[in-house]
Amino acid sequence: IYDAMMQLENEIHTVAVGSAIGQACLLLSAGSPGKRFMMPHAKAMIQQPRIPSSGLMPASDVLIRAKEVIINRDNLVKLLAKHTGNSEET
């Protein structure tokens, strides 16, 4: 969805209704500046990534999944910073 939004030349209006958590928060922030809205009781949050249940998975597979989760988190933070004008630390 994000990649498709970035291909459009039209303004993109985004509205948070309820909770925009994780990837939904990114989609909310990817709307056109001045066209991103939240309802009065809505909330936008990012959360710490979780590794899917590893069960009896080999340790090497757990490590691969953990690295993917960290990469995805870092990408999310970079994109949020880009669209909101904040630093990655903020």
Image (cartoon, rainbow, N blue to C red):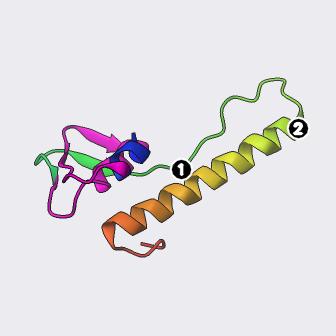
Give the side of residue 10 with respect to residue 65, left or right: left
Q: Amino acid at mark 2?
A: Ala
Query: Element under label 2?
Result: helix
Figure label count: 2
Q: Is residue 56 above or below residue 89?
A: above
Nearest the viewer among 30 and 77 is 30
Place residue 83 in its image quadrant.
bottom left
Residue indicated by mark 1: 48
Residue 69, image x, y percentages: 64, 47
Would you say residue 14 sits in the magenta stretch?
yes
**Which range of residues does the magenta coloring cover?**
7-36
Question: Which residue is pictured at 30% across the width and 56% down the height?
Answer: 29
Give the side of residue 36 with respect to residue 22, left or right: left
Q: Is residue 48 above or below residue 77?
A: above
Q: Amino acid at mark 1?
A: Gln
Say whether disc 1 or disc 2 marks the residue closer to the N-terminus.
Answer: 1
- Quick check: can you spot residue 22? no
Residue 9 - label: none
Residue 56, image x, y percentages: 84, 23
Nearest the viewer among 83 and 51 is 83
Place residue 85 in its image quadrant.
bottom left
Residue farthest top in this picture:
56
Residue 61, image x, y percentages: 83, 36
Residue indicated by mark 2: 59
Give the side of residue 41 with respect to residue 72, left or right: left
Would you say residue 90 sits in the magenta stretch?
no
* Label 1, residues with CA under 10 Å away: few <14, some 14-19, many ≥20: few
Question: Which residue is pictured at 64% across the width and 54% down the height?
Answer: 71
